[in-house]
Image (cartoon, rainbow, N blue to C red):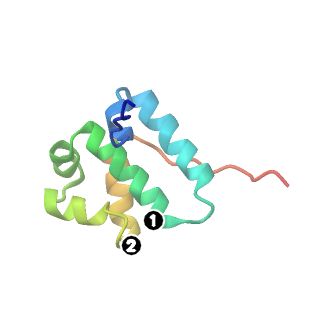
Amino acid sequence: MTQTITTRYDVAEHLRTPEEMAAYFDACLEEANGDAAFVVKALGDIARAKGMTQVAQDAGLSRENLYKALSGERRPDFDIILKVIGALGLKLHAGVSPT
């Protein structure tokens, strides 16, 4: 009997272009159902795909603070979220929910 070997899936390895990153973030925003930690974790995935050092520098944060903010274990201030979104080259858009 052969044994199946599995590896841990890391979405950051599959986010190669800005368009893929934006589509992933958009999908996560739609699926979050008000779960802020889920959205923050998605930003962390995108930041890892882009390179944490570069994102931290572009956001004006230390690399350590960026890791802490995007760990999903704490709720970072909204100004940090906005800095990270800007550093990732993403934009937030508002729309009307279907009724």
Q: Which mark is residue 76?
A: none
Q: Which mark is residue 75?
A: 2
Q: What's the residue at 32%, 60% (across, down)?
A: 70
Which residue is most to the front?
1
First of labels 2, 1 by sequence position: 1
11 shown above or below 31: above
Q: What's the residue at 48%, 59% (across, down)?
A: 38
Comparing marks 2 and 1, which lies closer to the viewer? 1
Rate crowding at label 1 as few (under 14), some (14 to 19) or many (20 or more) other CA atoms within 10 Å. Answer: some
Most foreground residue, 1 or 74: 1
> Disc 2 to disc 1, how far (Cα)?
7 Å
Q: What's the residue at 20%, 47% (across, down)?
A: 52
Based on the displayed image, in which of its 4 quarters is residue 12 positioned? top left
Most foreground residue, 59 or 12: 12
Q: Which mark is residue 37?
A: 1
Quadrant location, the N terminus: top left
* Numbered disc 2: secondary structure: loop
Look at label 1 and name its amino acid.
Ala
Quadrant location, the C terminus: bottom right
| Spot occupied by residue 56 in the image (x, y as percentages of width and height) | 19, 51
Left or right of residue 92, residue 88 in this image: left
CB contact under 8 Å: marks 2 and 1? yes
Say whether residue 6 is visible.
yes
| Spot occupied by residue 2 in the image (x, y as percentages of width and height) | 37, 30
Which residue is most to the right?
99
Say whether residue 89 is visible.
no
